[in-house]
Image: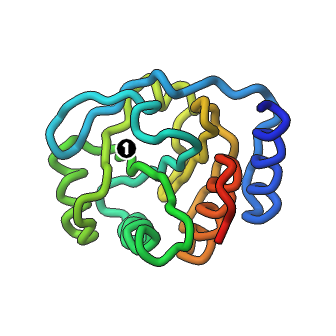
Amino acid sequence: MKILTGLIGGLLALVLGAQVHAAEPPALGGLPLQSIEDGTTHRIDSLAKGPMMLSFFEPDCPWCARQIRDLEAARTQCSSPLPFALVGVHGDRMELRLMLRRAQAGHLPAFIASPALLEALDGIPATPHAVVLDAEGRPLVRMRGYIPLARLCEIADLLAQAEGKPAP
């Protein structure tokens, strides 16, 4: 599985021109996230049954709002499903909920980053920011900045291939 994970991470890096860390990253699957909607706590590994993308956003970030709208569009416009969760930083639950409302996000999975998650990732320097996790919750690729819908669909196809599902 390590070889496959390395190949998928390498492919993502090549396709997306993303930043890749050579050191063995820590597994994030057991770390908690608090739901923005109802305040309940969820483990990262309970959010998806395989590789997924964490998309970080913050209040008053116009590019974050655009990213959120494209993630919502990816649910219906990509040929492969894109497993993702929105993760808010630099704001409290009320501010992050307001940001989601302004972005007209509908009912997307949205959480507040825990201090443990931010520490494990060495912080989130700017938003929008995305981290692609493998099936064990280890970061494969970090991407800084807005990711257009076409790239989100490429990521969805690569994640589907990592799970062994053929890309349409």
Q: Is residue 53 above or below residue 14?
A: above
- Up/down of 34 relative to 91, above or below: above
Q: Residues within 10 Å of mark 1 (few under 14, many from 20)?
A: many
**Residue beneath label 1, please?**
89
Place residue 1 in its image quadrant: top right
In the depicted structure, whether residue 129 falls above or below residue 51? below
Which of the two residues, 47 or 88, is positioned nearer the viewer here?
47
Q: Quadrant of the C terminus?
A: bottom right
Note whether residue 63 is visible: no
The kind of residue on which mark 1 rests is Val
87 left or right, relative to 34: right
On the question of residue 102 being in view, the answer is yes
In the displayed structure image, the side of residue 67 where residue 20 appears, left or right: right
Task: Report x, y in % for residue 92.
Answer: 22, 41
In-front residue for pair 9/48: 48
Residue 22 falls in image quadrant: top right
**In this rendering, would 39 be left or right of 34?**
left
Question: Which residue corresponds to the image point at 38% horizontal and 65% vertical from the top-left?
Answer: 68
Q: Position of residue 44 (x, y in %)?
A: 43, 32
Residue 65, position in %: x, y? 36, 68
Secondary structure, mark 1, is loop
